[in-house]
Image (cartoon, grey):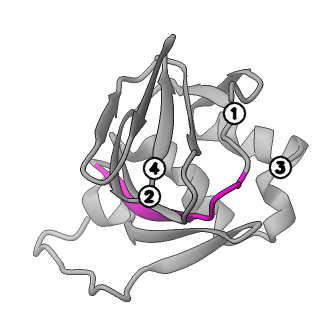
Amino acid sequence: MNTKGFVVPANGGSVVDSGAGRFEVLKVLREETGGSIMLFEEIVPAGTDTTTFHLHRDSDEIVYVLSGEITFKVGEEVTVGGPGTCAFIPRGVAHAWKNSGAETARAVFLYTPASAGGFFEELQRRPVESFNGPEALEMRRRHGWEIVGPPPF
């Protein structure tokens, strides 16, 4: 754990290419915070596929929309939000989201504790094809994710 604190510059962080023009820029990693938090920025082009309906067993999640429009499904509630929208998703609550706007969306994702973020940290060391299929399901399971349904949008 880094006990001095640190600053990640605007162009800093490692990039995960999730395919179809979708990227995660990992800014704060689990090991840097002693597992307290993990944070990344996601860039999602308009028309990109939605996420699966899933939950995190061991991590709460916060999503803050920087630009664009994102539709969230948290539990059974659907909300559309633009820049400044903030979603809190407690561990164990099923959720999904989608860029529902006409432009590229950017959002910051934070996991606390950091365990769920390990999926993206592991993904950075794998080819784009690893994001889907049996290998991705096993990676998600290792990091406390559970798919509970198909994409809801």
Judging from the image, what secondary structure is the residue with disc 1 in? loop
| Between discs 1 and 3, the one toward the N terminus | 1
Taking the image as shown, residue 47 lies to the left or right of residue 12, namely right
Query: What are the residue bounds of the magenta stretch?
Result: 37-48
Q: Quadrant of residue 144?
A: top right
Q: Nearer the viewer, mark 2 or mark 3?
A: 2
Q: Residues within 10 Å of mark 2 (few under 14, many from 20)?
A: many
Q: Which residue is mark 4?
A: 69
Question: Whole-percent x and y of residue 72?
Answer: 48, 32
Q: Residues within 10 Å of mark 4 (few under 14, many from 20)?
A: many
Question: Whole-percent x and y of residue 133?
Answer: 89, 45
Q: Residue at x 58, y 40 (%)?
A: 143
Identify residue type, mark 2: Gly
Q: Nearer the viewer, mark 4 or mark 1?
A: 4
Check if mark 3's residue and mark 4's residue have beta carbons within 8 Å. no
Q: Quadrant of residue 45?
A: bottom right
Q: Which residue is mark 1?
A: 52
Q: Nearer the viewer, mark 3 or mark 4?
A: 4
With respect to residue 14, does 30 lie above or below? Answer: above
Real-space CA distance between mark 2 and mark 3, rounded to the nearest whole angstrom:
25 Å
**Which of 104/129 is in front?**
104
Q: Residues within 10 Å of mark 3 (few under 14, many from 20)?
A: few
